[in-house]
Amino acid sequence: MNKLIFRKLSLDIFGFFLLSSIAITSIVWVIQGVNLLDIVSEQGHGIKVYFFYTALNIPKIFSKLLIFIYFLTLFVVITRYEDNNEILIFWTNGIKKISFINFIGKLSLIFVFLQLLLNLLVVPYTQNLKQQYLKSSSIEFFPKLIQEKKFSNIMQNLTIFVEGKKDDGSLEGIYIKEKLKDNESKIIIASKGQLIRSKNEFSFKLYDGKITNIDNKGSFNLKFKETTYELSKFTSNIRQSNKLGETETLSLISCLEKFLKNRKDKELRCSEENAFLIKDIYEEMFKRFINPIYIIILSLISSLTIIKTKINFLQSYFKILLFFFGFSIILLSELSFRFLSSNLQTEIIIIFLPLIFVIFFYFILFIKTRFRLETL
């Protein structure tokens, strides 16, 4: 009978968690999607690229929200059990409150594993995949981004200005500046031209103009009646290097192992000049490995709603206080990595803080029951 009761509780928790995850993640995803519309409006990528790119953001959004959604799920489900007096089924069947609390704690291990799976594998992979996809995708709306009397910096090292743009797509008063090296550049001026698309690549067909090459020695001019200026050699202004969150866990661990003793160094980098700082890698690993453990603490805090306080003036606000305490724990889990750069003692405390919280939780229960948990 007890197994059936706990199975019903588990199904209610998983059901509410699933619905809440879909609802809250969808809302945040839509909001972020609106903010990412510049992929189309400013960078010229197609709608297909936009939707694929934003869809790959879902694992990261869900990973960030998981700890809060699970805490909210437990709080709502257990409160609903109490309000409907369903919680009495546990006590009338001889289930102790400590058994109920322990069950919630054990159940949270599933969500800890889910969070670790997302942090260590899924999120880095999908974040890297979306960035690689964006870099390799063509700029479908490139012609739309060239506007009259407006400088366009759609691609790296390239500036385009057009005096006039007709309905048939022909251009007038074209100015193109290409940066070759630090002190070298090329300027092309044409009286008219046309933007031509061949497969997924664009080029300018230019008429009646001149090309000026500028370097430290001076400038060199060359007039032309007709020329073609290829754009395929340029890359878009999309970020080319990966961020920490887009880098696979094993690579970061391998780098951190080499410089573990210097993990707090604010200048040391993994290998190359543009590689990640060792300090940042250390903090990223902390967030990926340690933060999920806070889910256990939140599950234990949520389970305290079944325990009635003996302080009269707190009875009406006990659940509210628990909720805000749990929310504070979530904030602490997100900000705790900032204390890793402190002295060694503080660093050790921060790393083992989730375990300290769990021990402290059961110690309070021991005190409350005078070291007889079976009476709870």
Image (cartoon, helix red, strand yellow):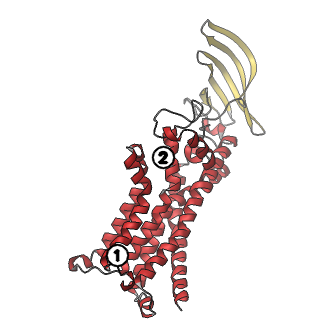
Residue at image coords 52%, 41%: 260
Residue identified by numbered label 2: 283
- Where residue 293 appears, as percent x and y from the top left, is 48, 62
Query: Which quadrant does the C terminus fall into?
Result: bottom left
Does residue 40 sit above or below 78 in this rendering?
above
- The residue sitting at the left extreme is 313
Tag 1: amino acid: Phe
What's the CA distance linking mark 2 and mark 1? Answer: 35 Å
- The residue sitting at the top extreme is 217
- Where residue 356 appears, as percent x and y from the top left, is 40, 62
Left or right, 80 with reference to 5: left
User: Can you tell which quarter of the image residue 326 is in?
Assistant: bottom left
- Where residue 317 appears, as percent x and y from the top left, is 27, 74
Does residue 42 sit above or below 297 in this rendering?
above
Tag 2: amino acid: Glu
Q: Tell me the crowding category of disc 2: few under 14, some 14 to 19, or many 20 or more residues within 10 angstroms, Cα based.
A: some
Considering the numbered disc 2 on the image, is that residue within a helix, a strand or a loop?
Answer: helix
Residue at image coords 62%, 12%: 214
Considering the numbered disc 1 on the image, is that residue within a helix, a strand or a loop?
Answer: helix
Does residue 91 sit above or below 299 in this rendering?
below
Dot label at residue 366:
1
Residue at image coords 48%, 32%: 267
User: Can you tell which quarter of the image residue 270 is in?
Assistant: top right
Judging depth in this view, the residue of 40 and 259 nearest the camera is: 259
2 vs 1, front mark: 1
Q: Tell me the crowding category of disc 1: few under 14, some 14 to 19, or many 20 or more residues within 10 angstroms, Cα based.
A: some
Q: How many marks?
A: 2
Could you tell me if residue 241 is visible in this image?
yes
Judging depth in this view, the residue of 318 and 100 nearest the camera is: 100
Residue at image coords 34%, 66%: 324
Of the residues under marks 2 and 1, which one precedes in the sequence?
Answer: 2
